[in-house]
Image: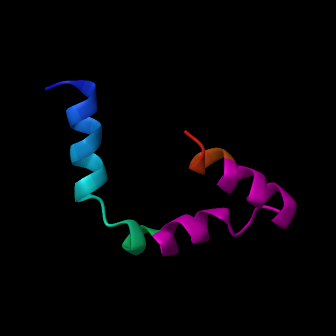
Amino acid sequence: MTIFSAALLLFLVMDHLGNLPLFFSILNPIAADRRWKVITRELLP
């Protein structure tokens, strides 16, 4: 299994909308301006 196929499989299997509450709860204690920097960093390839 190549890295690409493993990444594609993970992308297809993960429940993206279901993980949003977990992601937001982890980012809750972080200041708002820093939170946007973290979100932007994680969304960029």
Q: Residue at x 76, y 59 (%)?
A: 36
Quadrant for residue 23, please give it. Answer: bottom right
Left/right placement of residue 5 relative to residue 19 reads left
Colour mode of the rendering: rainbow
Classify the position of the N terminus by image quarter. Answer: top left
Seen from the viewer's position, the closer of residues 31 and 4 is 4
Seen from the viewer's position, the closer of residues 7 and 25 is 7
Q: Residue at x 77, y 51 (%)?
A: 37
User: Is 37 rendered above or below residue 22?
Assistant: above
Q: Residue at x 38, y 74 (%)?
A: 18
| Image location of residue 44, percent across then percent down | 60, 44
* Dominant secondary-structure state across the stretch colored magenta: helix
Left/right placement of residue 36 relative to residue 9 reads right
Is 25 inside the magenta-drawn segment? yes
| Image location of residue 30, percent across then percent down | 77, 61
Q: Which stretch is magenta?
A: 20-40
- Residue at far top of view: 2
User: Is 36 rendered above or below residue 45?
Assistant: below
Is 43 inside the magenta-drawn segment? no
User: Is 2 rendered above or below residue 30?
Assistant: above
Q: Residue at x 54, y 38 (%)?
A: 45
Image mark count: 0
| Image location of residue 20, percent across then percent down | 49, 71
Seen from the viewer's position, the closer of residues 31 and 1 is 1
